[in-house]
Image: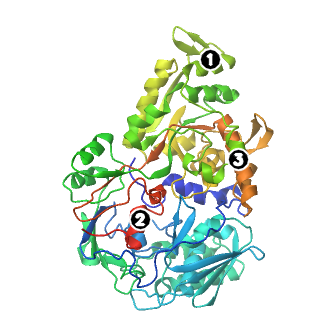
Amino acid sequence: MSEPRGLSRRNLLQVVGMSTLGVAGVTAAAGCSPAKPTSSTSPGASGGGGKKGGDFHGGWPYLPSPQGNYNLVGSPYVPVPNAILFGGPYGDLIAPPSAYYHWKEQTWEFFLADSYDLDKSTNTYTVKIKSGLKWSDGSALSSKDYLTTFWCQWAMNSPLWSYIDKIDAPDDTTFTMRMNSPAMVVERYLLRSNILPTSVYGDFADRAKTIQGSGKDQSSTEGAKLNSDVVKFTPKEYVASGPYNIDYKTINNTQLTMVKNPTGFNANTVNFDTLLIYNGETPVVTPLVLSKDVDYATHGFPVASEKQFQSIGYDILRPPTYSGPALYMNFDKVPEFLKDEKVRQALNYAFDHKQNGTVALGESGVAPTLFTGFSDNLADAWLDPAYKSKLIQYSFNQDKAATLLEQAGWKRSGGAWKLPDGKAASYQLLYPSDFADWSAAAKDLQQQLTKFGIKISLHGVVSTQQPIDVDKGNFQLAIQGWGNSTQPYPYFSYVQAFLTHNYPIAKNNGGKGIDFPLQTTAPGFGKIDIQKMINASGSGIDEAALKANIGKLAQVFNSLLPIIPLFERHGNSPALNGKRVKQFPTNSDPITQNSLYADNEVVLWILNGKLQPV
């Protein structure tokens, strides 16, 4: 699958769709407790201490102006579409966030901020901002820019404002954010948002503050006009706070060059003088990798391309994406899958997940082991052993699958399965035809299930239309995503599993999606309200309570299987050591547990000076 530009449609619905549910005060995602911060950076510090100079070559798709723009408002959570480089990791080198998260250690590495603190008695976060920071237009970076950033997010209808009610700047290096509904996801919105310059966006922020202060919201005439003005805003270039900016005269349809911003954060720490970014999706970037003109790329490459890269000297980095493809069932059109969870459990046993992942992505298609609804890579952080021990272990076992189908009233006749009413078990599988890995997964799944006796036919639709068809219910079976690539909290994965392509959010596209009932029964729990359980998995700041709620929801997903994860996608990013870059992170480094599409490990190493030229 090609890399997402900004928030993919799926991830955008995960974030924005909450307002549709009418649960603004309780749909905050849970985060880990504020860990002791770690940082190897400070303004002007010599981070890596290694050789400087040289250039770095990367790849990322962008649209040159006038289709592309330099409006970075809302990044990365509610971004304006087509902001050049701000749909991917390299934008953070122009306008860094306060910090990057280390997904393995669950700690923050600070950039623009020195520290942060949560006062639980007042539900208030306090960020201490580094002194001496400057924007490329010469203005000082201060707490006023934090106010500008989060007022502009209000104008962009950010879900953050569903559970905060006050922001303030007591002095130039102190920023505070008060929650009206405590939720640890606020920590990530706060620390991971790209900070905006007041010199560019201050007027929008002032308008947002005035509108909100008058008791009006974003749906008011004034709020809607402000949102429209922000989205249509087209600055001539970026005002940068980071160590790089674009050399605007170099931008064309094929490449652009990033150059040092001498007054930017860590400008004396980063080791490369220039970064050359080639424009293009996988077909364009692949030959550039083969000619060794690209040092690092995050595109989703076919297995054959990956083998070619390795044969000419590239290492392959395999960070998790904390997501992957899943089998979706339209329970309105195929009610036999809804009637008894044993049928869905049988499907999960009936095909080899490891084979499916290998066919699609080689080593980077990793079979799930826990089937909790969120990535196995997050299980140690969020799932207590007591809950883990209660999970069904879905190893490949077609005999077990057959037993479960028979218990549900299905019968096998001549190697083919028949439903309890005698009809043949025969279904069409809808898949995104332009996603190479998901297409391969769909074809392998079709072959495995058909051989097992459940006949599957394939119907491919382009990825821009296929999820809309899923939402409208125009399918029997389909491939869509599970998990979440941008948020280290299980809550967001459960939004994806139970809500995004189900009637609460699918109605935005005029349908009911999978039409899975959220008020149902589950083994060991009796009658449950899944919406309330999802809310509980993301509300509050008591980690023990959150883990208990997540553990219960993990058991519910594991037994009910509203969707069936096929495999987890890991990156297969080619990284070339020894030509322009001395040494990339290795797969054994904890930093490569950072999500490929959030807190990217290579950009992190550029920012903190660990990535060095030859």
- Categorize mark 1 by other alpha carbons within 10 Å: few (<14), some (14-19), many (20+): some
Q: Is residue 88 above or below residue 368?
A: below
Callout 3, which amino acid? Answer: Gly
User: Dot 2: what SS?
Assistant: helix
Q: Residue at x 55, y 49 (%)?
A: 377
Q: Is residue 183 above or below residue 510?
A: below
Callout 1, which amino acid? Answer: Leu
Residue on which disc 2 sits: 89
Tell me where residue 431 appears, x and y as whole percent: 45, 37
In this picture, residue 388 sits left or right of residue 545: left
- Marks 2 and 1, Cα distance to the nearest angstrom? 49 Å
Callout 2, which amino acid? Answer: Pro
- Marks 3 and 2, Cα distance to the nearest angstrom? 32 Å
The residue nearer to you, when weighing 70 against 193, is: 193
- Categorize mark 2 by other alpha carbons within 10 Å: few (<14), some (14-19), many (20+): many
Residue 522 visible in the snapshot:
yes
Residue on which disc 3 sits: 551
- Marks 1 and 3, Cα distance to the nearest angstrom? 34 Å
- Residue 613 image-quadrant placement: bottom left
Residue on which disc 1 sits: 419
- State which tag comes first along the sequence, 1 or 3: 1
Residue 82 visible in the snapshot:
no
